[in-house]
Image (spheres, helix red, strand yellow):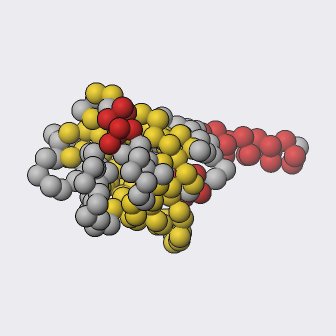
Amino acid sequence: MKKTFCVLIFFVIILSLACKKQFPDGPLISFRSKAKRIEGTWKLDKFYINSVDSTIEYNTMLGCEIEFILIDIIQGNAEGNVILKNCNNGKDYYGIWQYRTWGFCTTFKKDTTFTNGIGPFGSERSVGPWTVLRLTNKEFNLKTYDPGYGLWGSHPNGTPYVINLKKQ
């Protein structure tokens, strides 16, 4: 009886976690933290500007892989470095990323050679919050808005940017 009760409690906990979906596109359950899933090198799979597929433009202008390096996790909040690397022009571009309870943010450092930026990718572009649509070990999909006046953030009247990343 005691064993059956423990098994029943285990399934109730799993089902309650499954019903508490963290992101609009899943996953239902993950045994890795958000920060550990973000960490690693990603390739841009799809890039949409205002719902128009702009992947070719990104690959032509930048073509970079995106590496997220985890530095610290404190009380569920994570932060680290972001590097746009193996870009078409042979340069790497550096910044920071943060994951907080309210969203995901990126900020790229000032770089006078970063003249070929596109959307949220460019010198001194601070973007956040990104809405995390999907975060698995192999997929990372994000959405943000550019309100059109130099600031970034969750402004639904601005230009929407959606990126779909695949783990390398």
Q: Is residue 99 visible?
A: no
Of the pair 130 and 41, the residue shown nearer to us: 41
Looking at the image, residue 126 lies above or below residue 74: above
Task: Left or right? Give the position of 118 relative to 4.
Answer: left
Q: How many marks?
A: 0
The residue at the point 32 percent across, 51 percent down is: 121
For the view shown, which residue lies furthest in the left direction? 149
For the view shown, which residue lies furthest in the front direction? 89
Identify the image quadrant of the N terminus: top right
Of the pair 109 and 145, the residue shown nearer to us: 109
The residue at the point 26 percent across, 45 percent down is: 119
The residue at the point 50 percent across, 43 percent down is: 43
Identify the image quadrant of the C terminus: top right
The residue at the point 21 percent across, 46 percent down is: 146
Of the pair 61 and 4, the residue shown nearer to us: 61
Of the pair 156 and 13, the residue shown nearer to us: 156
Task: Left or right? Give the position of 8 relative to 113.
Answer: right
Among the 4 quarters of the image, the one containing residue 104:
bottom left
The x, y position of residue 70, in whole percent, is 54, 65
Q: Is residue 120 visible?
A: yes
The x, y position of residue 87, in whole percent, is 43, 50
The x, y position of residue 120, in whole percent, is 29, 49
